[in-house]
């Protein structure tokens, strides 16, 4: 998971933006398809929003694992910084 996170960061530095999907990384040959899935064969969850990027992993059963989460706030130029929580996990 750390490897694909570093690949996302590298792609953003080289191209100037994060990809819309992990499949875009493979199309652009930044990653190979096996890198975009976890050790159990489940695809990593990747979410790109206007001001954040999120990559989450799964447990062996394929359910999201809150211990496997990487995120980054994408600040805008001249943006007022509010040091609030980067992510809030809610459970039903």
Image (cartoon, helix red, strand yellow):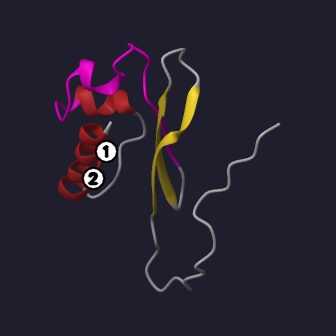
- Left/right placement of residue 78 relative to residue 86 reads left
Assign the N terminus to one quadrant of the image.
top left
The image quarter in which residue 20 lies: top left
What secondary structure is the magenta-colored segment mainly?
Answer: loop
Circle 2 — which element? Answer: helix
State yes or no: residue 33 in magenta: yes
Q: Which mark is residue 9?
A: 2
Q: Position of residue 86 (x, y in %)?
A: 57, 63
User: How far is disc 2 from disc 1 in space, using C-alphas?
Assistant: 6 Å
The image quarter in which residue 3 lies: top left
Assign the C terminus to one quadrant of the image.
top right
Q: Which mark is residue 5?
A: 1
State yes or no: residue 10 in magenta: no
- Left/right placement of residue 1 relative to residue 72 reads left
Q: Which mark is residue 87?
A: none
Q: Position of residue 18 (x, y in %)?
A: 35, 49
Q: Which residues are magenta?
A: 28-48
């Amino acid at each position: 998971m750390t490897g694909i996170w570093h690949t996302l960061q590298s792609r953003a530095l080289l191209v100037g933006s994060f990809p819309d999907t992990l499949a875009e990384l493979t199309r652009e040959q930044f990653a190979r398809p096996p890198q975009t899935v976890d050790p159990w064969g489940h695809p990593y969850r990747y979410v790109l929003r206007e001001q954040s990027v999120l990559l989450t992993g799964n447990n062996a059963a394929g359910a999201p694992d809150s211990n496997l989460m990487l995120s980054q706030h994408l600040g805008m130029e001249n943006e007022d910084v509010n040091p609030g929580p980067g992510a809030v996990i809610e459970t039903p």
